[in-house]
Each structure stands twice: as C-alpha cells, then as structure tokens.
Amino acid sequence: MEQYEIYEPAQAQKDAAGKAVRSLVFGILSVALSGVFAIVFGILARVQGNGSVRIAEQNGLPRDGRATAGRILGLIGLIIGILALVWGVIRLVMILTGLTASIASGSLGVFEEYFRDLGEQLNSVLN
C-alpha cells in the first residue's frame, strides 16, 4: 500500500500551484527548445504536472489548468525532442555513409571540389 504525504489545505494548495507553474514553464521551454533540452524539460514538465495533480487529488482540491497545460506541452516537447534527435542521427549516418562510399569509390563528389580548391589555395600561399 502506498503512503501519501498529508498536507494542510493551505499548504497543499500552495504546493500544487507551485508544481503547476513549474510544469507550465518547463512545458513551454520543452516546446521552444529542441534536442536534448526539449527532452529534459519535457520530462521535468511531466513530473511537476503529475506531482501537482497527485497533491490536488489527495487533498480534494480541483486540478490546476496550468498543470494540465504543462503536462501536454511537456509531452509535445518530449516527442519533438526525440524526433529531432532521431533525425539528427539519421542525417549523421547518411553523411558518414556517403563520405565513406565516396572515399571507397575514389571520388569524393562534392568534397572533391572543396579539397581541390583548398589545395590550390595552399599552393598559392606556399609559392
């Protein structure tokens, strides 16, 4: 059986409101940022929002809309962050496999022109 912390009504309302505000702020940050930051702030928004809802339910208080909004924004930010990281990994793999294939075939494609220009610039500096 799980034991819950019992709050005084005023303290419960204050703690639930504080967690709700933090949840909303973290949720907004998770949507505004991307990658790892979105994931971290999304998780924090969910945790704080769930804490606010738990305190409200245990003490017979109404749910705070800011907690609900923070939880939803946190979930959206979490999904966006995960998708951004997956897309970044896919792009990195595509770049690395393309470069590896170009080196193996003896042609560097786009990189070949870059290296040719770099070599010409080095020759002009050295001569």
Image (cartoon, rainbow, N blue to C red):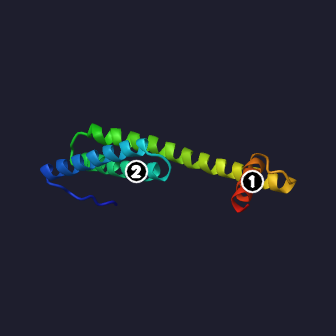
Q: Is residue 57 left or right of residue 81?
A: left
- Sequence-wise, the earlier of marks 1 and 2 is 2
How far apart in space, not on screen, are marks 1 and 2 (Cα)? Answer: 48 Å
Residue 13 position, x and y percent, is 18, 47
Q: What residue occupies the far right of the structure in this picture?
A: 105
Three-letter code, disc 2: Phe
Give the residue at x 42% y 41%.
Answer: 31
- Depth check, front residue: 112 or 85: 112
Circle 2 is placed at which residue position? 41
Instruction: Tell me: residue 93, above or below residue 76.
Output: below
Residue 53 position, x and y percent, is 30, 46
Circle 1 is placed at which residue position? 120
Q: What residue occupies the far front of the structure in this picture?
A: 127
- Depth check, front residue: 50 or 34: 34
Q: Residues within 10 Å of mark 2 (few under 14, many from 20)?
A: many
Q: Is residue 22 left or right of residue 81?
A: left
Three-letter code, disc 1: Glu
Q: Quadrant of residue 65?
A: top left
Q: Is residue 115 visible?
A: yes
Q: Residues within 10 Å of mark 1 (few under 14, many from 20)?
A: few
Q: Is residue 97 visible?
A: no
Give the residue at x 50% y 42%.
Answer: 80
Residue 1 position, x and y percent, is 34, 60
Instruction: Tell me: residue 40, above or below residue 24.
Output: below
